[in-house]
Structures are given as C-alpha cells and as structure tokens.
Image (tube, rainbow, N blue to C red):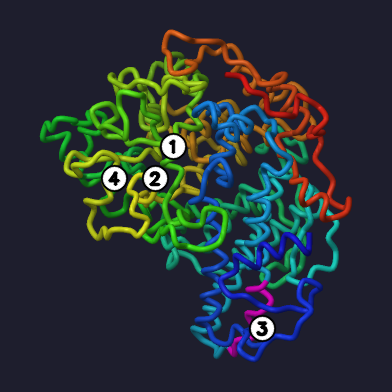
Amino acid sequence: MKKYLFAAAAAMTAVSFTACDDMLDTEPRVTEMTQATFPGKPADVEALNAGTYSILNTIGGGDCDNQNIFFWWEVMSDNCYGSGGLQDNKVKSLHHLVEMSANQYETPFILLYGGINRANNQIETIDNVPWNGGKEDKQRKQLLGEAYFMRGLYTLWLTQLFGDVPLITSTTITDDVQKDAETVIYPQILSDFVSGMNLMGDREYAGSGHANKFVAEGFIARAYMFWAGFYKGVAELKDGAPAIDLVAQEGCDKASLSKDDVVAGLKDIIANGGYRLLKDYRSLWQYSNSLLLAEAKDGEKHAYKFIEDMDEADCFDKFGNGNGNDEELFQIQFMNASSWNIGGTYNAQRMYSNYIAVFWGLRNGATQQNGNRNFTYPFNQGWGQGTPSCNIWDDWTVAENLGGYTDIRKKASLIDLENELENYTYEKDDCEESGYSEKKFAAVNLDACGADNDTWWSKADGFTSGSLGNAMQGDHFHDYYLMRYSDVLLMASELTGDASYMNQVQKRAGVPETAYSLKAIQDERRWEFVFEGLRFNDMRRWTGKGAKGGYASKALQAQAGKMIICLGDKSNKRAMAHMTCSWTERYEATDGFLAKPQNQISLMNGSLVQNDGWNAADPTTQYKVLY
C-alpha cells in the first residue's frame, strides 16, 4: 500500500514533496520544496488547502461509473436501476452488488487516500509558517480545522465503501495494517470532526465551498448516526445510543462524544447557523432558472409547465437560491475550467463540470439523435445510466394516496417520461428502463440557446466559454449538495423524537405534518434526498451490521418483479430480476460493502483482507450479462 497508494496520491498533490520514506531514496534538489521549507507563508497553506478540497471535484466531476461515490450509493439503493445501454456493465454491476473485475472499485480507494494524504500534509506542516497572532492565528485555526474535517470526511466515505481499512493519520506510514472501523476508525473520524468544529469559524465561510463550524456539527451527526445504527445496532436513536471514545489532538480534548453532544450540535446549527429551508423545493434545482420560467410564462414553443406557477424571486438563479443557497451547508462547487488538456488520470479533464448531469441525462432514441429538443426539451441528452427505479415512483405514489396529498418533491425530482416528454422514445439497446428519469441534476436547455445540447448556463450572467469545447459534457455548474439544512432538521427529529423539526420539512413539501415515528422519518429522508447519495447508507444504518431480513434487504428485494422496458421496446417488458441470485443474498453477504481492490490486497501482502461476500470464485459475486 505504501509503495502503490501513496505513489498514486503523490501524482495528484498540488505541490510535490520529498520525504524520508522508502518511496524516495534520493536527496532533494536545491530547487525542490520539502516539508522543511514549504509552506512558508499563509498563502502556501491556502494552496495546500485548495489541493485537499480538489479531491471532491475529481470524485464529483469524473465518470460516475468509475468514481462518483454519491452516484454509486444511489445506484446501489432501491432508488435506481443500473440501466444504460448493453455496454454499460459497470453501473449494472453496482446495482446488482456484484463485480465485473477484481479492481473495479479501486479509483475512489486511491482518490480518498490521496485526499487523506493531502490533509495529513496540511496538518503536519501548518506550523512551518510563522503565524503572527491576531487575524493570522484565526486563519491558522480555520485552515487546520478544515484539514482535520476533510481528513475525517474522506475517511468516513472510505470506510462506508470498504469497511475495515488502513487508518492513515500521518504522511509517514509506520503501520499499514487495516483497522477495525467500529472501534478504531470511527473514533478517529469523530475526533477529526470535533477538531474541525472547535477550530473553524462559522457563517463567514457559508456558501464558499469550504467547511465551517456548522458543517462539522452536521457531519458529526451523520457519522455518529451511521456508527450507532450500523455498528452498534441501535434501531431507535431517540431512545438512546452509546457514547463513542475520542482521540486527543488539537481541537479535540474531550474523552468521548455522547448522543446529547451530537444533538447539541444540531440545535446549534438550527439556532445560530443562519440556514433556512427555501420556500419552494424546486428552487434548489437548475430547471427552475428564471430564463426557462420566462419562456414558460411567455408561451414559448417548448414552455415547461411544471415551473410556470413559480415566482421569479424563487428561481434557481435568483439571490439566496441555487448555487450557494441559504439551505446548503456543504457542497461540491464547479466552474467553467474543464479542459481536455488537464493532465493526470481519473478523468480530471471534467473535474470542474458536474458530470452527474451527463450520466443521469436522457439517452435518446434513434429518431432523436444529438438531444433533439423536440423530444427531450427542456432536458438534454446524456448516458441514461442510474435510471430511477419503478420502486421510488410507486412507493411514493402509495404514500400520497394513503395520505391524500400531493408531494411536490416527487415531480420535482423525477421526470415522468410518458406525461412530461410525450414524444420520448428509447434507444434500441436501453436496459432496465422504468419510464422515469432523474430531474434534480438533469441538464437543461433553452429555446434561446438555439442549439441542441447547449445548456442554459450559456445564457446565464457571467458565462464564459470553457476550453472543453463540448457543452453537453462540460457546461454543468450546479452545486452537488453534500448536506442541506433539511438534513439537519430530519437528523434532529430522529435523534430526539421531536416531530417539529420533521414537520418543517413536510410543510415545505405540501405533506401533512405527522407525529414522530421511525417510519415517518425513513419516508421523509427518502423523499427529501432522493438522488443525493444518502439513501443507501441510511438503509444500512436502519438495518444494522450482520442483520438478516432487515430494512435494506427487504427494500432492495422489493425491486424484483417490477416490469421494466428492455432493449428500447415499450412492448418488450420483463420482470426485474437479480443478476446472479437475489438482492437479499448479495446485501446480506456483503453488508453493503464493496470489494476491496485486488491490487491493494496483493501489494499489502495479506495485511489487507477482502470483505465478506466477495470471493471471486463464487459466481454469485460476478457480473453476468442479462440482456
């Protein structure tokens, strides 16, 4: 691991360093920067910090089937199918919880360790700078707090993907042996978040793409709830959950973190964070931009009726909404800087474009090539992977019918192809089509753009042409939300049993306010955050490690038997079935963990152990052609 993982990480660092390590056995040249000479001033630490954050863009902006873990977790849940074309085997293997190759899941493994390495370097070298008190000391605390927070965040995602892994808290690796997530890694994750909370400032950094005190408090809750639910098997968090031991480090001088501490952090966000729920749920998503609204209200050829009742002040591109809005605590931000000439690997060329719009985009039939707007408007062409499942629409409709209400979030999140795009047809090799498509992050066009597969961003204020030269792949600049204020409210209800927090989320959606129940929370989280990467790990924590017949097993297996469109023919429907056995069997065999990359297992000479349920000799673990 030392020789391979961090050699790869070094290629991704913003500034290359030499070190006393067996990876490098030569003396540094006079012109090279080392940890002894760099950083030398506050601006240098800011540069290191930018490099630590940039891993977010590489994960969120690259090919989704290779490295976008948020897309993965939606596809692995009951919200989405794998779908796409016949050749799109990676996404199908994710949905069926199997593998198509021994190193299929290696890219995020390397990327996340690269981010951890950058954060460790930032922590270790920050005091090379002669901080001069006053504002500079405040700057030091913020930058150190961000480094701790980002190390905790990358480690959280790494262990949610792969379980017990090496815990790396230094750039000098002395012990490569994998650690127990429950007793060793999660205490470190929570300690890093606590350090971040105590060192970072608060609202002055809101909406900047940087973490702050309130962001740390939110992720303390998310990590603690996963640990308590998945590892400790606490079914009802409101009734109590154990404290977790912490690790002493700068900013973290508590011996343990209790549930009461976690709740206090959420209440601090609610009382003092300055965040709010946007009035209209649609304001969060780019299809509600004022340019498209103007077309709808003017009766243009392709008027998009779903938003024509909106107030212009509530549009995505108006102050307080959209990117940097008052509801988002933490996000991945994008900009018009993608270029085919960006060096390196891991699809870095598109790291500044929210590429999830392309993967979830509509896959056009033979009669509507190149995103012909007469068939897809106002949405654009894409790869058609991760198609919403029949289950998410059907389960939502059942809830609406039982409650006698209409939830604005359903049609705000999903495109009903039959009723919204009546001319839409499928590609001849489309697989696992449900009749729905993802709307939240879908690319959006305008009549004013004139060209098929242009995006509305080209008409937005301040747009400049990017060097990627491909609007379909490069011009997607909407934030990817990593935490919204509604998540804070729902976590607060789940931890306390106080329905008033949940009721605020329900009221915004037009859903009747209900008394607290775990079932109500489970439904609200599913409806509120569909396609935002939270569902799969929510399912896992409501199930518990090693549980049989639990929440996740039942929800995933409920996909079986749903009628799906195959090979692009609406008349050619078949019952959805698992690729090799059943979703219950695959989930319970793996607990939702992915296979660790064989490359890493081999390089660590046996100290990295493969996860349960991933014996390559077992045919139930291996990809199988279905269509």
Residue farthest to the left, as pictured: 298
Secondary structure of residue under mark 1:
helix
Residue farthest to the top, as pictured: 571
Mark 2 highlights which residue? Answer: 277
* Discs 4, 1 touching: Cβ within 8 Å: no
Q: Is residue 619 above or below residue 64?
A: above
The x and y percentages for residue 419 are 31, 19
Mark 1 highlights which residue? Answer: 505
Tell me the tag on residue 34. 3
User: Are there few (<14), some (14-19), or many (20+) residues within 10 Å of tag 1?
Assistant: many
Q: Which residues are magenta?
A: 121-130
Q: CA distance from mark 4 to mark 1?
A: 31 Å
Q: Nearer the viewer, residue 206 or 22?
A: 22
* Discs 2, 4 touching: Cβ within 8 Å: no
Mark 4 highlights which residue? Answer: 455
* Discs 2, 1 touching: Cβ within 8 Å: yes
Amino acid type at circle 4 is Thr
* Discs 1, 3 touching: Cβ within 8 Å: no
What residue is shown at x 36% (from left), y 22% (from top)? 416
Amino acid type at circle 2 is Leu
Decide if residue 20 is on the left or right side of residue 363. Answer: right
The x and y percentages for residue 227 are 72, 45
